[in-house]
Image: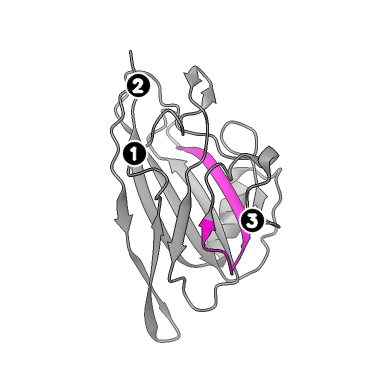
Amino acid sequence: MIAKIVALCIMLLVTVSVSGRTAGFTLTTPGMGEKLTKTEEYAGFGCDGKNISPELKWMDPPAGTKSYAVTVFDPDARNGAGWWHWLVFDIAASKRTLVRDAGNPDKKLAPEGSVQSLTGFGKSGFGGPCPPKGDKPHAYVFTIYALDTEKLEADEMNLPSEVMEQIQKHTIGKASCTSYYQR
């Protein structure tokens, strides 16, 4: 059966209070055109996509941002705990984009100094959607975190739970975009 794609990109504008002012922080996925496709689908685990991470752009980060982290999470995974598809952090505060395929560590397209840690697939870098055939559409939540530190106490070998503990400890703002994918 040809992959059935149900995609909807919902921009969630998250406001944060910073020094008594409210600032809007947004994330967009212009490279996806509001849809996940075979281009983003994982290549493995029974999936035969290209496993290319989409372009991501963000704007209006909160004052005091010293770095960013980006995650992609599937809360609908059958394991009952969700599935981490991408964790990249230590992105310099001056950056406002991740280019298409930045999730491939071998291509070195991610911002200099950034770190891509382990995913649910057991390796670093972007691991695209790969829901079981016949499952309901799975949500893929792309989140940008504005952090109050330049570097997290983590590296490419840290588990998603360890990286998320660090991210949560240093988050001063975040914005998300959710897309759905079904095979």
Answer left or right for 6 relative to 47. left
In percent of the image, x 35 and y 22: which residue is there? Answer: 183
Q: Is residue 116 left or right of residue 22?
A: right
Upstream in sequence: badge 3 or badge 2: 2
Q: Which element is circle 1 on?
A: loop
Residue behind mark 2: 3
* Among numbered discs 1 and 2, the one appearing first in the sequence: 2
Magenta segment boundaries in residue numbering: 82-97
The residue labelled by disc 3 is 111
Q: Residues within 10 Å of mark 2 (few under 14, many from 20)?
A: few
Q: Mark 1 points at which residue?
A: 35
The span from disc 1 to disc 3 (Cα, nearest Å) is 24 Å
**Residue 91 lies in the magenta-colored region:** yes
Figure check: 172 above or below 89: below
Q: Where is residue 7 in the image (x, y as percent from the top left)?
A: 30, 37
Do tag 1 and tag 3 residues touch (Cβ < 8 Å)? no
Q: What element carries label 3?
A: loop
Residue flagged by tag 1: what amino acid is it?
Lys
Task: Give the secondary structure at mark 2.
Answer: loop
**Amino acid type, residue under disc 2 in the picture:** Ala
Magenta-colored segment: predominant secondary structure: strand
